[in-house]
């Protein structure tokens, strides 16, 4: 039986403190994940990597380990005390980040990134499962939206600071500095945070009580809820676009617009982080404004914003001057980021309570393999394919990646239509 040894907390201060701690954990998750994209130029230079090879390191290698480790961790989340599990995972991925600073070859760095990815795979699912149990449904949309902005803060810090620090200390020094906060926060979790127990959700059916954590339960959930499957596929396309963009954004400004590494990092961090923060929070709060079928509203909004983001992304990477590129990139990120909090809220709402942690972990597995795993690789392959055909092949690779956003919009629209006629 999964541990449910404490009552769900009713005190708002405890809920919001827990959200703050979990927010910090996820910030570090994204920081450690983003180190390779933020340091693309020195890493490609030191290890002599093509764009496709770098996409393999930043995306496919990392995401494969993330996905494989998610399977056993998905079983653990619903069976152990989640706060202790989260602290252990945080300490482990911080250790592998520190170890990566000593990598002497592409192979050694890849092995360290495998360790980081494996530990990180349980981080966000554990945090989201805790948030779902700390917050009642009436507050869950805004809680998830606020939590989702961690990626914005992490991107701002990682991209802005990494370039500056790398010019002074080298990329190895950046890896070492990034590992220290994780050890400290792991101790804070063990000392101050408690597992709140499991809270039922409004979508739970009588058969959900019979579910046990595992892949079979996930397959039963997906087969019985096509709307969840459409949301998952749409999120994969949307994540692939943002992952491909994020992996090469500093390289884009260095190679195409001739920024220094520090300038590219600051520009990328500011634009991506603020666009992501505004878009994610706006999406979450808009779905909480009216109680009537917020799930359908969330899916419909995700579809509209994904479609709106497409032309801005294309112009951003084809614009002839950096000012226009930055302005369009901010607008693209604003619209393209709305799906993130919306999708997480939908996945939480539609997951059975008894296996919510396992379901979120396995869904995260699929999202990482399909989105984070393929997005940077697709962008790198498109860029290498355009080499010799156009003067600036990375432009073509990034612009081509944007064309997956209309596919995401179509999937979210299909989910919206099903939610409109099958509202619980």
Image (tube, rainbow, N blue to C red):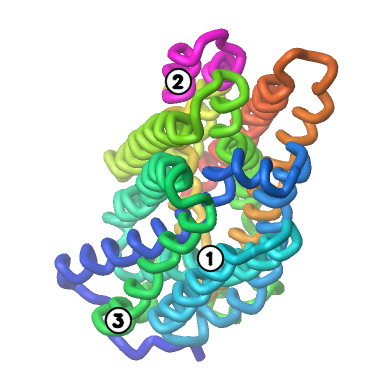
Earlier in the chain: of badge 1 and badge 3, it is: 1
Write down the residue under mark 1: 97
Q: Position of residue 290 (x, y in %)?
A: 29, 40
- Which of the pair 277/153 is nearer the observer? 153
Splitting the image into 4 quarters, where does residue 178 fall? bottom left
> Mark 2 highlights which residue?
326
283 vs 306: above or below: below
Question: Is 210 situated above or below 423?
Answer: below
Foreground: 5 or 22? 22
Q: Earlier in the sequence, mark 2 or mark 1?
A: 1
Q: Which residue is mark 3?
A: 194
Secondary structure of the residue carrying numbered label 1: helix
User: Of 270 and 337, which appears nearest the observer?
Assistant: 270
Task: Please provide the residue range marked out in magenta.
Answer: 311-330
Question: In the image, what residue occupies the spot 47% across and 57% down?
Answer: 173
The verdict on residue 3 being magenta is: no
Residue 390 visible at all:
yes
**Could you tell me which residue is drawn at 64 percent across and 64 percent down?**
103
């Amino acid at each position: 039986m999964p541990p449910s040894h404490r009552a769900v907390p009713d005190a708002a201060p405890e809920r919001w403190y827990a959200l703050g701690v979990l927010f910090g954990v996820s910030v570090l998750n994204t920081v450690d994940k983003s180190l390779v994209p933020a340091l693309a130029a020195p890493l490609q230079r030191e290890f002599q990597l093509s764009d496709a090879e770098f996409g393999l390191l930043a995306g496919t290698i990392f995401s494969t380990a993330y996905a494989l480790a998610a399977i056993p961790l998905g079983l653990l989340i619903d069976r152990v005390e989640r706060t202790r599990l989260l602290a252990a995972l945080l300490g482990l991925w911080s250790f592998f980040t520190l170890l990566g600073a000593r990598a002497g070859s592409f192979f050694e760095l890849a092995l360290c990134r495998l360790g980081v990815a494996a530990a990180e795979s349980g981080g966000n699912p554990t945090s989201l499962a805790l948030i779902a149990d700390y917050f009642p449904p009436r507050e869950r949309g805004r809680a998830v939206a606020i939590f989702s902005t961690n990626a914005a803060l992490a991107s701002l810090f990682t991209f802005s600071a990494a370039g500056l620090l790398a010019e002074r200390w080298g990329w190895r020094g950046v890896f070492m500095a990034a590992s220290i906060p994780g050890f400290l926060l792991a101790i804070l979790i063990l000392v101050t945070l408690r597992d709140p127990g499991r809270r039922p959700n409004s979508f739970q059916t009588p058969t959900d009580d019979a579910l046990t954590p595992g892949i079979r339960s996930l397959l039963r959930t997906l087969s019985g809820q096509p709307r969840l499957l459409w949301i998952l596929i749409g999120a994969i396309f949307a994540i692939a676009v943002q992952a491909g963009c994020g992996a090469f954004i500093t390289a884009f400004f260095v190679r195409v617009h001739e920024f220094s590494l520090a300038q590219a990092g600051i520009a990328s961090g500011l634009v991506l982080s603020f666009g992501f923060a505004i878009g994610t929070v706006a999406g979450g709060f808009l779905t909480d404004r009216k109680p009537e079928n917020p799930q359908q509203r969330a899916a419909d909004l995700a579809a509209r914003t994904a479609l709106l983001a497409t032309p801005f992304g294309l112009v951003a990477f084809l614009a002839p001057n950096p000012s226009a590129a930055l302005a369009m990139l901010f607008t693209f990120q604003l619209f393209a980021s709305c799906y993130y909090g919306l999708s997480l809220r939908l996945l939480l709402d539609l997951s059975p309570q008894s296996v919510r942690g396992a379901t979120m972990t396995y869904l995260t597995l699929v999202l990482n393999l399909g989105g984070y795993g393929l997005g940077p690789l697709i962008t790198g392959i498109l860029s290498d394919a355009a080499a010799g055909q156009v003067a600036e092949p990375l432009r073509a690779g990034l612009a081509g990646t944007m064309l997956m956003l209309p596919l995401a919009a179509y999937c979210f629209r299909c989910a919206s239509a099903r939610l409109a006629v099958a509202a619980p």
